[in-house]
């Protein structure tokens, strides 16, 4: 008895089913339809309610308020701003302040984090314990607590301007913040900047050249004396030729406050300090785990090839550790940027503080203001993680993995 | 032989070599000192730097907190250097005076036993849950995660009940059907396409309203009767017991049936004890809550509520159904991409606009919703890591046995995955506990908020008040977070016991 061959299942039907409903086929499609229907219904309810509520409260929806006059002052502005400027300008001022505090915080957090990690791995018992104690203490206290501590207890307890702590009579530390000499451009500035630019470019190009020469001729070349020489020498020559690039405006106590110089607000100092020390505690653990994840044999192999301990660390261990370190490090950078929104607690005019704080309370445009604020933070997060994954991808490629 | 024998030795030792010094000691105090602190010039330098660091941080701290501290007093003058004529450290009378505020906030004095009772109950239920050897984990977990939150709500907030499950289900269903009908009629008035969608929606709504009509009638009858809570409870018990009996069948023995009945008796006892049918305890609005109470309520609710959200999102992200996966990814990435403080603002200012006008929602409740969604997104990523760590073979073996997706996930994959990620989850709980301090920015007075409020009190404003307050609250936060992290280490160690050789 012959068995009739069954026709093969229709490829098109199977593909369609997979595309529409995933592996569960038509059942998945029905689940999706139901899901979308529920989402649509919730969305409809939200829009409907919001429309009713806004009409009842007589709030006009839309982004028209962005061009209205803000009418409030901002204590720290890095781009020109006046009270008569629009809310759009306020938004930009806040954004710049957020970015500044984040970048500076990230820089110091990375530095301190690597130091603490190396301290924890140090063979010196005392240093390892101190670093460990730092990490435990910092990581188990809320960030807002730490920000308030620095702002209220430490910086707030500093003496007033009259009794301020001064270094060389030009740096003043008081409860009004840190006052430092302000650089003022003079005749030689252009030449100095050009020389500095050339030196920086040379310092970037030189290692690439040295590496190519090593591959071509097999002769190693010590790069760092050249780089340091260029970076210091060229600007120095420029100064000798063109004259002083800039002078310093020394602050002085006049009446109840300082005149001249540049003032770094205590809010900024407290926020940066807290963000950097807090994030450093987390970065330290990430770096430590990354270095420990590299097999001990790698270090020994480096030594057996005659590399020095420093060279082994730099050329063999750290690059491999970086692959483990980078993804969580990115997360910490993002956390720091997002956490900078806590500035609202101490009145540093960051994006959240001036926009979701002052602007929201002045205009009452809750939906628009919060949507914009959330969108900007989301965008910063997405851009940062995209950049870091690009970097991580390049490292992986150069490692041949 | 003879050649060798003829050689006369050039030198034969006649006396003993002088004793060499014993090898450098590597054990004991001296050994450790020598080996770990002073074994090279760099290390000696590092040790000196470390010792200086310790000297400049630890010594002043101890001096401030203990040696120079003021222990008794009634107002600021007792903590001033001018009155005491010596260096003044921590002002502990300030903490003593504010301690009840730090714990209870503005909770009315005579009602504070309710908070104490809630804390005690929580500790009593939590402790055996944390000790791996303690018996009856399922019952304990059920009590802690389901029964305790409900009881805690009625204890802390007060107030009574108007009905029970039957009424609530009827309310919820009629509300849903009503809103569906409204949406349908709204759409039916719109353009050609909208009518096409609106008409069927309206039909569905009408059909559903006929379907739930008996339930609505039952609810009205219960509400009209003299004892709505008790009648409703009895009806619910009857319905649920019947359902359990039908679903499990009597062949399996009466165990599930007994459990159901016991649950309902427990509920009845609680209702009778707290007099929930007659208004219950006096209501204490959440505006009066504060201090450690708010910190614990927000963090515990956040932890408990974020777990199911996190698990659902993690499963959604791994689902093969495209739209559900897309939604989960978008949802998780959105909440993880924004700071918690914007989430709290969203919950405080935007959420009320999205709800119907007659539906007001409590300030604390809004924050709880925001925190749960936020923590849920973070937990989802942790749980996803655990799900990814389970070998495919586990799920394949389950489907080879003919288990459904729900059973495969619930009985095979999830339990293993959650075991894997306990340390990660505890980490995210610690983060959540610390982040609860942010609620002080949206005008809720948690521990940190109370601390700031206490600083404003002129009776206690001295130069050292700030440091004392920070030291005290810092200690509380540290104890909780450090305790959690040590516990997670302990669990991790225990779960990995089989891996150690």
Image (cartoon, rainbow, N blue to C red):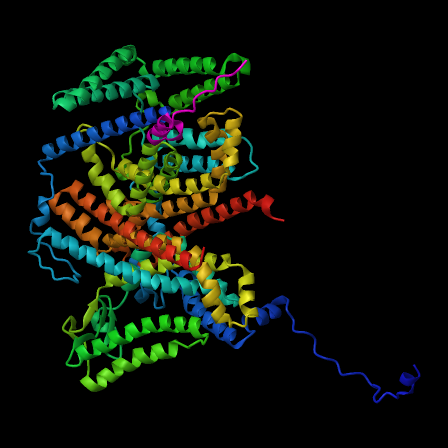
Residue B184 in the image, given as x and y percentages of width and height: 18, 20
**Span of residues in magenta:** A1-25
Which residue is nearer to you in this view: A58 or A67?
A67
Which residue is nearer to you in this view: B77 or A84?
A84
Left or right relative to A293: residue A332: left
Residue B377 in the image, given as x and y percentages of width and height: 35, 41
Which residue is nearer to you in this view: B41 or B363?
B41
Decide whether residue A13 is among the magenta residues.
yes
Left or right relative to B165: residue A94: left
Who's the residue at 24% across and 66% down the image?
A175
Residue at the extreme right: B2
Quarter containing the C terminus of chain A? bottom left
Residue B235 in the image, given as x and y percentages of width and height: 37, 13
Residue B132, by quadrant, is top right
Residue A180 in the image, given as x and y percentages of width and height: 22, 73
Residue A212, by quadrant, is bottom left
């Amino acid at each position: 008895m012959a068995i009739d061959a069954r026709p093969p299942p229709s490829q098109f039907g199977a593909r369609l089913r997979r595309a529409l409903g995933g592996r569960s086929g038509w059942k998945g499609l029905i689940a999706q339809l139901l899901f979308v229907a529920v989402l649509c219904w919730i969305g409809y309810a939200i829009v409907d309610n919001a429309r009713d509520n806004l009409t009842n409260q007589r709030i006009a929806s839309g982004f028209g308020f962005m061009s209205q006059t803000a009418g409030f002052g901002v204590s720290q502005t890095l781009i020109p701003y006046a009270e008569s400027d629009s809310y759009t300008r306020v938004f930009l001022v806040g954004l710049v302040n957020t970015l500044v505090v984040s970048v500076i915080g990230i820089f110091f957090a990375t530095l301190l984090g690597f130091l603490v990690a190396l301290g924890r791995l140090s063979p010196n018992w005392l240093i390892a314990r101190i670093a460990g104690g730092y990490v435990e203490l910092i990581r188990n206290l809320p960030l807002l607590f730490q920000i308030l501590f620095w702002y209220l207890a430490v910086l707030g307890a500093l003496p007033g301007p009259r009794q301020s702590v001064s270094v060389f009579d030009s740096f003043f530390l008081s409860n009004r913040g840190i006052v430092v000499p302000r650089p003022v451009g003079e005749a030689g500035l252009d030449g100095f900047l050009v020389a500095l630019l050339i030196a920086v470019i040379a310092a970037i190009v030189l290692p690439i050249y040295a590496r190519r020469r090593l591959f071509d001729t097999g002769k190693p070349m010590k790069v760092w004396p050249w780089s340091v020489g260029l970076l210091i020498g060229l600007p120095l020559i420029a100064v000798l030729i063109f004259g002083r690039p800039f002078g310093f405006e020394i602050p002085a106590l006049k009446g109840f406050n300082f005149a001249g110089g540049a003032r770094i607000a205590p809010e900024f100092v407290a926020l940066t300090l807290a963000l950097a020390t807090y994030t450093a505690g987390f970065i330290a653990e990430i770096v430590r785990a990354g270095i420990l994840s590299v097999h001990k044999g790698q270090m020994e192999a480096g030594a057996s090839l005659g590399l020095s301990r420093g060279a082994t660390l730099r050329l063999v261990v750290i690059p491999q550790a970086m692959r483990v370190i980078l993804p969580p490090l990115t997360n910490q950078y993002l956390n720091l940027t997002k956490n900078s929104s806590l500035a609202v607690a101490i009145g540093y005019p960051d994006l959240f503080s001036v926009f979701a704080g002052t602007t929201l309370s002045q205009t009452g445009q809750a939906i628009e203001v919060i949507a914009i604020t959330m969108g900007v933070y989301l965008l910063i997060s997405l851009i940062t993680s995209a950049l870091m994954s690009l970097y991580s991808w390049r490292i992986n490629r150069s490692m041949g993995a | 032989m003879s050649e060798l024998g003829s050689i006369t030795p050039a030198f034969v030792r006649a006396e003993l070599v002088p004793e060499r010094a014993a090898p450098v000691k590597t054990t004991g105090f001296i050994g450790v000192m020598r080996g770990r602190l002073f074994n090279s010039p760099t290390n000696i330098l590092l040790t000196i730097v470390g010792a200086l660091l310790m000297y400049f941080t630890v010594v002043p701290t101890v001096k401030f907190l203990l040696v120079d501290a003021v222990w008794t007093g009634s107002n600021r003058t007792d903590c001033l250097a001018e009155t005491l004529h010596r260096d003044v450290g921590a002002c502990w009378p300030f903490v003593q005076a504010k301690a009840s505020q730090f714990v209870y906030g503005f909770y009315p004095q005579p009602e504070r036993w309710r908070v104490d009772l809630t804390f005690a109950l929580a500790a009593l239920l939590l402790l055996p849950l944390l000790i791996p050897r303690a018996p009856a984990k399922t019952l304990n977990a059920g009590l802690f995660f389901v029964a305790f939150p409900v009881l805690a709500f009625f204890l802390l907030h007060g107030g009574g009940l108007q009905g029970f499950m039957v009424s609530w289900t009827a309310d919820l269903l009629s509300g849903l059907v009503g809103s569906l009908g409204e949406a349908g009629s709204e759409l039916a008035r719109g353009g050609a396409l909208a009518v096409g969608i609106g008409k069927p929606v309206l039909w569905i709504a009408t059909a559903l309203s006929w379907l739930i009509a008996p339930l609505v009638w039952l609810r009205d009858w219960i509400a009209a009767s003299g004892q709505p809570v008790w009648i409703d409870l009895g009806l619910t018990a009857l319905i649920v017991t019947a359902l359990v009996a039908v679903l499990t069948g009597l062949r399996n023995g009466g165990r599930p049936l007994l459990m159901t009945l016991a649950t309902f008796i427990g509920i009845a006892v609680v209702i009778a004890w707290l007099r929930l049918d007659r208004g219950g305890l006096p209501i204490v609005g959440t505006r009066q809550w504060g201090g450690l109470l708010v910190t614990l309520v927000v963090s515990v609710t956040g932890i408990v509520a974020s777990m199911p959200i996190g698990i659902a999102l993690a499963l959604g992200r791994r689902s093969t159904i495209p739209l559900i996966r897309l939604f989960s990814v978008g949802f998780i990435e959105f909440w993880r991409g924004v700071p918690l403080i914007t989430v709290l603002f969203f919950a405080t200012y935007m959420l009320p606009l999205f709800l119907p006008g007659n539906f007001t929602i409590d300030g604390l409740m809004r924050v709880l919703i925001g925190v749960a969604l936020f923590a849920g997104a973070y937990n989802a990523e942790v749980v996803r890591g655990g799900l990814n760590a389970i070998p495919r073979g586990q799920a394949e073996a389950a489907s080879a046995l003919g288990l459904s997706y729900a059973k495969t996930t619930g009985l095979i994959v999830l339990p293993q995955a959650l075991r894997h990620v306990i340390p990660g989850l505890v980490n995210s709980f610690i983060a959540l506990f610390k982040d609860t301090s942010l609620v002080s920015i949206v005008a809720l007075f948690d521990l940190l908020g109370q601390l700031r409020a206490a600083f404003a009190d002129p009776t206690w404003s001295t130069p050292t008040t700030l440091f004392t307050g920070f030291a005290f609250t810092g200690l509380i936060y540290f104890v909780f977070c450090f305790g959690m992290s040590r516990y997670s280490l302990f669990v991790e160690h225990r779960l990995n016991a089989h891996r150690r050789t």
